[in-house]
Amino acid sequence: MSRVPARIRIETVIGCRAITGSGTVSSLVEPLLHFAVPFASLRAVGIDMRKAALASLIALAPDLDVFFHVHRSESHSIIILAAIVIPLLFLTRNRKEARAIVLLGTFGLITHLVLDLFQNPTPLL
Ligand SMILES: [Zn+2]
């Protein structure tokens, strides 16, 4: 009988798993959490469903690095986040609706980074 770490066994039993670049297995619960937390937060303060859903989808973006066989890489950096958000805020300074989407998406990204800080080492700089 092979010795499989308990975490891998549990996630295999659940049937929802993703293999990350480090070779570890992590549950798909994590992306659901990265979606649900900003969505619930934004809905709680009265943001409409479509905008909250869009911001929550944007919150999933940092974990797209999994497709490049790395996880929690530079895509989780506050500096990279600022390098993307600041120009977007400048470009949307006269477009109220677009600027609101940028700010809501930024909120989603920040919740992603904060949630990742509670789980594993995340390179924020
Ligand atoms: Zn992440």
Image (cartoon, rainbow, N blue to C red):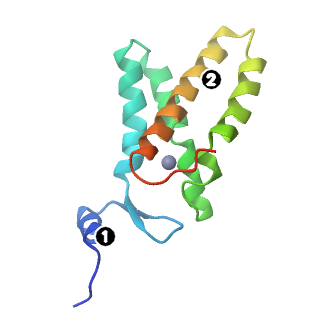
The tally of labels here is: 2
SS at circle 1: helix
Q: In the rendered image, which quarter contains the C terminus?
A: top right
Apparent side of residue 11 relative to residue 106 in the rendered image (left or right): left
Q: CA distance from mark 1 to mark 2?
A: 37 Å
Apparent side of residue 83 relative to residue 35 in the rendered image (left or right): right
Q: Disc 1 marks which residue?
A: 8
The relative height of residue 102 versus residue 15 in the rendered view (above or below) is: above
Amino acid type, label 2: Val
Q: Disc 2 marks which residue?
A: 102
Residue 96 pos. (x, y %): 66, 9
Q: Quadrant of residue 88?
A: top right
Residue located at (52% from left, 26% from top): 107
The relative height of residue 108 versus residue 118 in the rendered view (above or below) is: above
Residue 62 tag number? none
Residue 27 pos. (x, y %): 35, 57
Near mark 2 (Cα within 10 A), the count class, few <14, some 14-19 or many ≥20, is some
Compare marks 1 and 2 and give the one earlier in the sequence: 1
Q: In the rendered image, which quarter contains the N terminus?
A: bottom left
Residue 100 pos. (x, y %): 59, 15
Residue located at (40% from left, 28% from top): 39
Give 38 or 86, whichever is nearer the viewer.
Answer: 86
Residue 35 pos. (x, y %): 42, 37
Apparent side of residue 64 relative to residue 40 in the rendered image (left or right): right
Q: Quadrant of residue 61?
A: top right
Q: Quadrant of residue 67?
A: bottom right
Give 114 or 96, whichever is nearer the viewer.
Answer: 114
SS at circle 2: helix
Residue located at (54% from left, 67% from top): 21
Amino acid type, label 1: Ile
Near mark 1 (Cα within 10 A), the count class, few <14, some 14-19 or many ≥20, is some
Apparent side of residue 116 relative to residue 77 in the rendered image (left or right): left
